[in-house]
Structure formats: structure tokens, C-alpha cells
Amino acid sequence: MSQNEKVSTARKYWKLIPGFAISAYFLWRVLRDLKVDRLREMRLSHPVWIGVFVAFIVCDYALRGYRWWYMLRPVKASYRACVRVLLTSLAANNILPFRIGDFMRIFAYAPDVNAPSSTVLSTVLLERLLDIFMLFTFFVVELQGADSRFPQHTIYGHSLGVQELAIVLLMVAAVGLGALLFGTRLLQRITHGLVARFGQHPRTKKLGEWASLLFDAVLHLTFVDRIWLVLITSAVWFCESVLFISAAKMVGIESGVRGPWLAASLSNLSFMLPSAPGGIGPFEGSAKLAMQSQGAMADDAALFAVLVHVLIWFAITAVGGIGFLVHRAARGAMSKPLTEELAAVPVDLEVPETH
């Protein structure tokens, strides 16, 4: 390994420190309220909710796979391959740093869904924007009329609560998504003009390339397709919310009706923060905050946060890992060694060439 490669590798791993520090901070805030006695008292109060959890996590990720397959219909991707690659990438994100699973999905497994890496990247970008918009929508709806104990913030003498801030963010997200889905060509012209004027900086150029891929992904969709993707995304996050309700019901954790719903939205939005693999820390901290805001005791909220993350993390990691191993076994000698596969995946998201 050359000196430049050593410096690059060292710099790459230094980038992990802020994320792990954020995870450690949030975990400390959660675990300090998780009493040993409360763990000993935990009982499976309503076993029927295990079945509900299993049914809805299957629906959740089957719908995510369907949504991705729907975007990839022009390249005639297999639905089964889409689900397998998606779950494998999510499992890798849960255990490896740098969200390496997303890079594997874009670069290593693009041939598995019969698409160039540039096409896969465009669908992943659209997928992320749909998810963020829908999570903000759910969050704002769930906050309305809630007995919120979220802290108030004062900005230039004006009190700003979480509800007001969430509404502002939702409006921004709605305008952005609306422009993307239903004003794509106008937004494309504006973006190209800005990049042409200010695109000398490498980062600006890269953002322009990502935007071009995103616009291409949308322009391939009909008006009905775009509406359908929004509806599928709403169904995905409804199923995800039921997982949080099921986890609370399993062990008899009480909070307001909105508690688990708010926890689902807030904890998934927390993935936008840098953290350890799997969102450990911010996920638990956000879920605990949401449950406490609706009346749950601190120890119950901490127990719920850890429980729901362990259940979802284990289910996705196990299923994605098994799918990965079964597929590699079926390919036999055709499979590259995993170390080679990971080494070929970039950790800085460059726009792949279209081919």
C-alpha cells in the first residue's frame, strides 16, 4: 500500500469518530434510564402481537422491494432479485460502517437487477426523497393535538415548538417533492442553469450529476406512476409504524395513542444523523423521546426504544444475511470472494458512468 493510500485509509476511518461519538451520547441518555429491575420485570403480555409484528414486517419490506422493482421495470428487473438485493444492502448497513450496503446495492449488485449502476443510483435517490417526505408527513399529522412535551425553542424572541418546526419542514419537503414529481422539466432547467453558472467546484458538479440522474428517474415515470409511488411509500411507513405499536403491546408498555406512531417517524428520521452502523444511538434516543412525550415513564420508554430496535435490526439483518449466503451458495464458483467484493465498492459516492 502506497503512502497516499495509507493516508486516504486513515482519513476514511477518522470520519467514523463523530458518528460513534453521537451514538455513544444517545445510548448513554437511553441506557441510564434502563433499570435492571425493569428488565427483570419484563414479561410477554400479549403474545398475539408477535404475529402482528411478523406479518407487518413482511409486508413492510415486501412493499419496499415492490417499490424498487416498480422503478426498475424499464430494465425488466426481477422482483425476487430486487427484494434480495435490498435486504442484503440493509443488512450490510446494519453491521458495516459508511452505509456500505447502499454502495454495494449501487455498484456491486446492479447487474443482479439487470441495471447499470447509474440507474440504480437514480432509484435510490428517489427512494430516499420519498421516504423523507412521507416521514415528515406522518410526523406532522401525529403531532396535531398531541400532548407534546417536546422542548420549546426561542428564536429572535419567538417561541418555536416542535409542531411549528415540523410543519415548516413538511412544507419545504412538500414543495420540493411536488416540484420534483410534477415540475421535473422546469426544475431540471433551473438546476442545469445553476450548475452551468456555479459548477466549477467539484462538489457542485457532483450534485449536478446526481440531480440529473434523479430527474431522469422521474421522467421515465408517468403521472400515474408518480402518484402510485407516493401511495406505496405511505403504505411502507404505515406498516413500519405498526411494528412500533406491536413492540409496545408485546410487553405492555403504556403511552398515549400517538407514542409509538411518533417513535416510528422520529426514530427513522434520526437516520439522517451520522452514527454507528444501524443507526444505533440516535434511533433509541428518538424513540425514547417520542414515548416519553406522550406519557410513558422514562424506564418504560428506554426499554421500548431498545426492544423495538433490536427486533427490527435482528429481523432485517438475519433475513438479509441469509438471503446473501443462499445466493452466494447458489452461484458457487461464480461468486467473488467477499473481501474482493467489498474492496471494489467505493466509499465516496461518485456518479457511475452510464453504460
Image (spheres, rainbow, N blue to C red):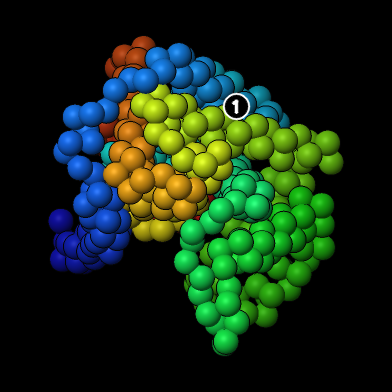
Q: Kindly identify the amino acid type of the residue bearing the numbered disc 1.
A: Leu
Which quadrant of the structure image shows residue 250?
A: top left
Residue 93 seen from this side? yes
- Name above or below for residue 231 compared with residue 276: above
Residue 187 on image: x %, y % = 76, 63
Residue sitting at x 58%, y 77%: 159
| Position of the C terminus by quadrant | top right
Residue 134 on image: x %, y % = 64, 46
Which quadrant of the structure image shows residue 50?
A: top left
- Name above or below for residue 50 compared with residue 115: above
From the viewer's perspective, is 148 left or right of 44? right
Secondary structure under badge 1?
helix
Residue sitting at x 41%, y 18%: 46
Residue sitting at x 60%, y 27%: 63
Badge count: 1
- Name above or below for residue 49 compared with residue 166: above
| Position of the N terminus by quadrant | bottom left
Residue 125 seen from this side? no
Residue 103 on image: x %, y % = 42, 44
Q: Name the residue under label 1.
A: 63
Out of 279 and 108, give the one closest to the viewer: 279
Which quadrant of the structure image shows residue 338?
A: top left
Residue sitting at x 60%, y 51%: 146
From the viewer's perspective, is 185 left or right of 261? right
Out of 172 and 215, give the one closest to the viewer: 172
Residue 302 on image: x %, y % = 31, 44
